[in-house]
Amino acid sequence: MHLPWGDSGIRNPLTSSSPAAVAAANKTLAPGNGTIEFQPDTNVTGVPRFAKIAVASGFEDTVYERAIETHVRHAEKHGYPLYLAREQAADGMFNKVAYIQNILLNELYKPADERVKWLFYFDSDSIIMNEEIPLEIFEPPSDFAHINWIAGKDWNGLNAGVFLLRVCPWSLDLLEFTMTYKHYHPDEDYVFEEQSILARLTEKDDRFKHESIYVPKGWINAYFYSMQEVKPGLLMSHFPHPDYKWHMYEWLKVIDTDRDEKLKPVYNKPVQDTDYPKEIKAFWNAKRRVDKALKGFQRNIDRGADPVQFGLQHEETKALAEKFKEKYEGLKDAATFKTDEPDTLENMVNEAEEVSSPNCPSQFTVTKFSPSAMPNSFKS
């Protein structure tokens, strides 16, 4: 792995910056560039499917400006409009929600055939690592056309530093609820400001959760310090804390080297040479399988089919019914909270099917639930 700080005990020449370079990297500029709107060349065929959005209000920093430039190059390469807000129109992190809402409204006011289909929001502390990756590869397949929100999560849950939002009235509702949520729920906890609200809405609110999905975070929001996430070929890397600015500076040098035409690129790879095609296919197949399994289990429950086995004693039957209930409920939660772990989803489906399978053990066959054997909590 080519990392800017080198292997343990080895001084990497990429980190040997002069004091002058360090000072320049940490220079903060006064605001004044104004809100930026980049439109692709008119020779781009058709209406682009994506627009990119970011907010960098209140200050301008040379490192963050260079990071934003990587997104501009990516937008230019693929013909995406890019919108960058420089002004503060709402408090704190809600400024980004307001700006996205503004761009979304502008799109919705256009004739349908002139709109972009998706908005790709990115924090200004992120860097495009691979300009070759088109955002279109992240669009849900046709059987998941109801998905309107795509994001990744870390150990704190949702990370709203990067996400995809479909251009549709549903998305406008989501942003409106996010902007007004604190007013109607003043006593709730808002550790991560707008991120806390977006997580509650997309994970728990029936108006939004069925149209929202978590994808593997590394696809769109890899953290630079995770060896499993930052690997050659990934779209971008995120540096979600001001203390990481120095690392941004070093990674920007890596990207500059990677763009040198005299050298073989390490991070810029055609999409077919990355893990994306295989991983994206596996992801949606796992989601299809868990959805199909849940529908089958629910159908059997509704018609009274027994997920446990005929011929067991009453207490054994109850125990197996409870075990199936546990697996079933866990799978339902995983269909919302663990979609970013397709291997885990596959294993959970296997475990639930084992409990309900008529082939385990072989001497038993599927029969009907006895009301006395079915837990009361499961009936409800």
Image: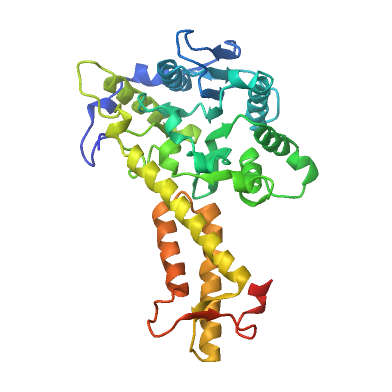
The colour scheme used here is: rainbow
The picture places residue 75, in percent across and down from the top left corner, at 45, 19
Against 81, residue 185 (above or below) is below
Question: Quarter holding the N terminus?
Answer: top left
Extreme residue toward the top, this view: 42
Q: Is residue 167 left or right of residue 22?
A: right
Instruction: Tell which of 215 and 136 is nearer to you.
Output: 136
Give the residue at the far bottom of this rendering: 313
Q: Position of residue 125 (x, y in %)?
A: 48, 29
Residue in the picture at 53% in, 39% down: 150
Q: x and y percent of residue 23 in the render? A: 41, 19
Direction right: furthest residue: 184
Q: Quadrant of residue 192?
A: top right
| Relative to 359, 178 lies left or right | right
Closer to the camera in the image, 74 or 85: 74
Q: Quadrant of the C terminus?
A: bottom right
Residue appearing at x 76%, y 50% in the figure: 187
Viewer-closest of 34 and 49: 49
Classify 187 as above or below 260.
below
**Does 235 appear above or below 275?**
above
**What residue is at 25 percent from the left and 25 percent from the top?**
265
In the image, taking residue 351 as reference, residue 367 lies left or right, namely right
Identify the residue at image location x=49%, y=85%.
310
Provide residue 261's location: percent of width, then percent of height: 23, 15
Q: Is residue 191 visible?
A: no
Query: Foreground: 355 or 343?
Result: 355
Q: Is residue 179 visible?
A: yes
Q: How many marks?
A: 0
Task: Classify residue 21 as left or right of residue 345.
Answer: left
